[in-house]
Amino acid sequence: MITLARALEAAIHAEGEKAYPNECCGVLLGTQDAAGVRHVETLLPIDNARESEEQYHRFRIEADDFIRAESEARAQGRDVLGFYHSHPDHPALPSEYDREYALPFYSYIIVSVTKGKAGLLTSWELTLDRSRFVEETIVREK
């Protein structure tokens, strides 16, 4: 389970719309409680490092950006909980490409952006054997 404030959901929607027709991406920072519930407390937008001609259906976060996210999380007393990205003109479902490059233990939020308008937002976690994603319940908070 993952909690997400409505303002953060709106920010992901806005980033997806701004990046359209390309994919946006960023990092989820927050805490995980003793019950394993992840609480997203802030977002760290990242510039999509994929080649410009591939950004319409792929994103990449460079190692330097990940290190910056880890440092920012530590400075805030938070953890990197996962990542978010948009799927322009495609459903908010992980692709095979997403599965190949994902890591277990992280949450992966995907927002569908159709004709420039953000829609459904989902969250996924990769199984330990990396064979498939399992959808996470999103609890939206004020």
Image: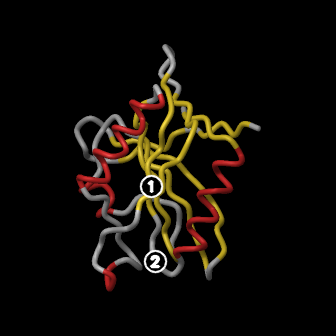
Point 30% across, 38% down: residue: 104
- Classify mark 2: helix, strand or loop: loop
Question: Picture coordinates of residue 17 (x, y %)?
Answer: 60, 72
Q: Considering only vertical position in the picture, is 40 above or below 37? A: below
Q: Which residue is mark 1?
A: 26
On the image, which quarter does residue 40 sit in? top right
Classify residue 136 as left or right of residue 79: right
Classify residue 44 as left or right of residue 114: left
Given the current orientation, which residue lies at the most extreme front position? 75
Name the amino acid type tagged 1. Gly
Classify residue 131 as left or right of residue 119: left
Label 1 Cα neighbours within 10 Å, binned few <14 / some 14-19 / many ≥20: many
Which quarter of the rendered picture does the N terminus lie within? Answer: top right
- Classify mark 1: helix, strand or loop: strand
Q: Considering only vertical position in the picture, is 129 above or below 26? A: above
Q: Nearer the viewer, mark 1 or mark 2?
A: 1
Question: Picture coordinates of residue 92 (x, y %)?
Answer: 52, 61
Q: Which residue is mark 2?
A: 22
Of the pair 97 and 71, the residue shown nearer to us: 71
Given the current orientation, which residue lies at the most extreme right position? 142
Name the amino acid type tagged 2. Asn
Report the Cα–Cα distance between label 1 and label 2: 14 Å
Question: Picture coordinates of residue 36 (x, y %)?
Answer: 47, 22
On the image, which quarter does residue 75 sit in? top left
Question: Picture coordinates of residue 134 (x, y %)?
Answer: 43, 42
